Image (tube, rainbow, N blue to C red):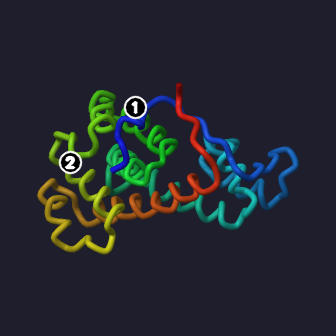
Amino acid sequence: MSSPSRFTMEEVGWRPRLAPVDAETATPAQRAALDACPPAQRRSTYFLTLAHDPASLGERGALFTTVMYAPRGLPRAERELATAVVSMANGCVYCTSVHARRFAELTKQPAAMQRLLDEGPGAETDPRRRAVADYAEKLTRTPGAVSAADLAPLRAAGLDDLEVLDLTHAVAMFANANRLMQSLGDSDTPA
């Protein structure tokens, strides 16, 4: 895992390497793709940068919404925990900060997330969350090494088939999301 101490729950900025699309002069296709994204993200620099390819952004926005906000399966806080762990493993400071904050907001347990940021996923003491964090980290770091045996701790922690699938979707999607963010720009860490 990348040095856990570099991660934070504070807001982190992001500077694109490509000029973002100007929301006021965006094409109809670009506006439609942005409108399909969650409202809080529609005017973000990152999504305006992705709007250069409206078809891809539209697909990405739909996938993100389905994977992260579906009302069934894995609880939302556990999806946020998993994506924070994935983002830490991938070294994406921006995504880690966003999903760490969301986890803390949903659980009202910022100290638990701060411990994870400071010490890494092994610091998680709740058995279910530990199973989620361990699986997310392994699937991120060594996807080819994940086997049916890696589902046993998830099953022992009470996850059902849909929850395991939701967890796997979140981890896989963030492999892509982190790479896009890191390739297209740089995080501005707080001073």
Residue 64 - label: none
Percent of width and height locating residue 24? 85, 44
Location of residue 100 by image quarter: top left
Q: Nearer the viewer, mark 1 or mark 2?
A: 2
- Outermost residue toward the front in this view: 3
Q: Amino acid at mark 1?
A: Glu
Percent of width and height locating residue 70? 43, 55
Q: Residue at x 39, y 59 (%)?
A: 171
101 over 25 or under it: above or below: above
Q: Residue at x 19, y 48 (%)?
A: 128
71 or 172: nearer the viewer: 172
Residue placed under numbered mark 1 in the picture: 105
Tell me the crowding category of disc 2: few under 14, some 14 to 19, or many 20 or more residues within 10 angstroms, Cα based.
many
Q: Secondary structure at mark 1?
A: helix
Lateral position of residue 110 relative to residue 38, left or right: left
Residue 130 - label: 2
User: Do residues under tags 1 and 2 come within 8 Å of each other at their CB atoms?
Assistant: no
Lateral position of residue 12 relative to residue 157, left or right: right
62 over 112 or under it: above or below: below
